[in-house]
Image (tube, helix red, strand yellow):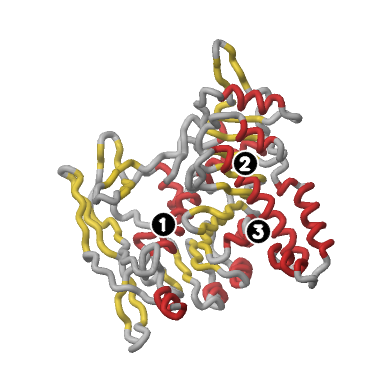
Amino acid sequence: MGKDIKKMYRTVMDDHFPAEMTISFGDQTLIYRKRTWKISDDKTGDLIEKGLRYGENPGQEAALYELVNGNLALGNCRFVEQGKGLVSAITEEEMLRSGKHPGKINLTDVDNALNIMKYLTAGPAVVIVKHNNPCGVAYGTGLSNAYKKANMADRIAAFGGCALFNRSMDLATAEMISENYLEVVAAPDFEEGTVDVLAKRSSLRVIRIGRMDKLSEYSHMRFIDIKSLIDGGMIVQQSPLNAIKTSEDFSIASTVYQGKTSTIKREPTVEEYADMLFGWQVEQGVTSNSVIYVKNGVTVGIGTGEQDRVGVAEIGIFKAYTKFADALCFKRHSLPYKELELAVEKGKKDRGLLRQIDNETKEAKGGLIGSCMVSDAFFPFRDGVDVAIREGISAIVHPGGSLRDFEAIEACNEANPPVTMVFTGQRAFKH
């Protein structure tokens, strides 16, 4: 059974999807062409054309299509047009190394990384995605610095993930990447010698993404989002647009309840506004229900996909603590925290080493002190705000609009020192 499963993971499936697909929206027609790449046949060595390796799991046929004809306009909305392909337009020349032939998840991870990166124009940035959610996002003084920060934000989750860079790959960054295990590395270009360095990881897919110089333009464009239902039906929606372009688009939290006005006492600092903007931009690519924490242009803890608001706030805090402890352990002892924990249990390492890391993590509150809390929807009760305030956060971003916004505002004003809060005026759910 084990050998059969491993073989399934290695097998590039034949798919039975058509080479071309046409979708009609009333009297408007969109034409899509299936994307394939030439690969070497395992048995004969001959070059053969294949599409995606498989879908979300081995045994699921899948295909990637690029829009090649049609300009869709519905109501007052005009959607992404032909000739603007990113992931769907990856050519064989841009697949610098195919590693293991790419599957659906590899490319949807790149796509969601681009969905976040399209906002990150303030400097060198790295987005690491795993299972279509960011596990580490960071700005840096340079590309290698940004990668180091993004990777250490959640070194464990980054294992086997997809890393997207908004600058040309340089040798220093490539050397750092080669020491870790990633499934995909994507960038606008690759300097001479970097692909050879990255090739130390034989299964790594190295992809050059065209049009990344125009990536910020996609933050203003909508696309058609189609969700298929189990009965063969579908729900069609416009993709969302992020209304927060600059820190000036936030509004200081204020509400009226039973004739009484509640307003945040302390306005954000320049640094807090920068983190608020960064955090809200990252939030656009996080599966809801979500709460994330960011500090100094780096993600600290990311809570995703929970059913209740306070629960996901707590999960983000828990992850901040565990990732902080692991990063500290790895820097100090070149060991993951769990490996040190196991060595201590077996009597191979002194328990004092573990105790010291735990104490430092607790004292630093998992790196959450002075961080910004970002929520994709309002807080129905103040409990979600309270759990974060106890960890020393200094700022909160959320849409606003709850009947109990006044409670969240009171919690911030009662904090010592007071916590600042802004509203975005829009929800950022992503399912």
Q: Residue at x 60, y 41 (%)?
A: 313
The quarter of the picture where residue 357 lies is bottom right
User: Label 2, on which residue?
Assistant: 275
Q: Residues within 10 Å of mark 2 (few under 14, many from 20)?
A: many
- Going by the numbered disc 3, the residue's amino acid type is Met
Give how far across and how far down residue 362 sits, in percent. 76, 48
Q: Nearer the viewer, mark 2 or mark 1?
A: 2
Asked if residue 249 can be seen in this view, the reply is: no
| Position of residue 72 in the picture relative to residue 221 (left or right) | left
How far is the residue under mark 2 from the one under mark 1? 27 Å
Upstream in the sequence, badge 1 or badge 3? 3
State the residue position of label 1: 211
Q: Position of residue 222 (x, y in %)?
A: 35, 43
Which amino acid type is shown beneath numbered disc 1? Answer: Arg
Quarter occupied by residue 96: bottom left
Q: Are marks 1 and 3 in contact (CB under 8 Å)?
A: no
Q: Which residue matches tag 3?
A: 152
Q: Is 73 situated above or below 172?
A: above
